Image (cartoon, rainbow, N blue to C red):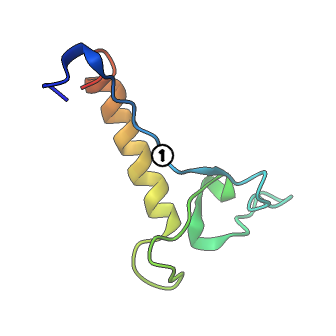
């Protein structure tokens, strides 16, 4: 990124999907998609190891994505590197 200088700008993209549109956020505010979502089914991600019982969950992916976006907004957004 440094070698490209002002020729390129990096923007992170996260693969998070809307739990409302995927029907993971139930009518009574319950999470219908279990370990794939956070915030009662509002923010979801696919399970990276395809095992809903153990390992990294979709909810873990959502939390890590949020953490990375916060770091990007705090430290990388101004100059893109």
Left or right for 32, reference 77: right
Residue appearing at x 39%, y 30% in the figure: 11
For this rendering, which residue is in front, 38 or 19? Answer: 19
Left or right for 30, reference 53: right
Residue 3, located in which quarter of the rendered image? Answer: top left
Screen quadrant of the N terminus: top left
Tell me if mark 1 has few (under 14), some (14-19) or many (20+) residues whose alpha carbon lies within 10 angstroms of its own. Answer: few
Count the numbered circles shown: 1
Residue 36, located in which quarter of the rendered image? Answer: bottom right
Residue marked by disc 1: 14
Q: Secondary structure at mark 1?
A: loop
> Against 71, is 23 above or below?
below
Left or right for 5, reference 25: left
Screen quadrant of the C terminus: top left
Q: Position of residue 8 (x, y in %)?
A: 30, 22
Q: Position of residue 66 (x, y in %)?
A: 43, 44
């Amino acid at each position: 990124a440094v070698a490209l200088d002002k020729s390129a700008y990096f923007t992170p993209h996260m693969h998070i999907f809307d739990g409302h549109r995927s029907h993971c956020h139930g009518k009574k505010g319950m999470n219908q998609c279990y370990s794939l979502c956070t915030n009662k089914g509002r923010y979801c991600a696919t399970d990276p190891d395809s095992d809903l019982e153990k390992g990294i969950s979709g909810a873990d992916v959502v939390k890590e994505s949020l953490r990375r976006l916060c770091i990007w907004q705090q430290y990388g957004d101004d100059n893109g590197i």
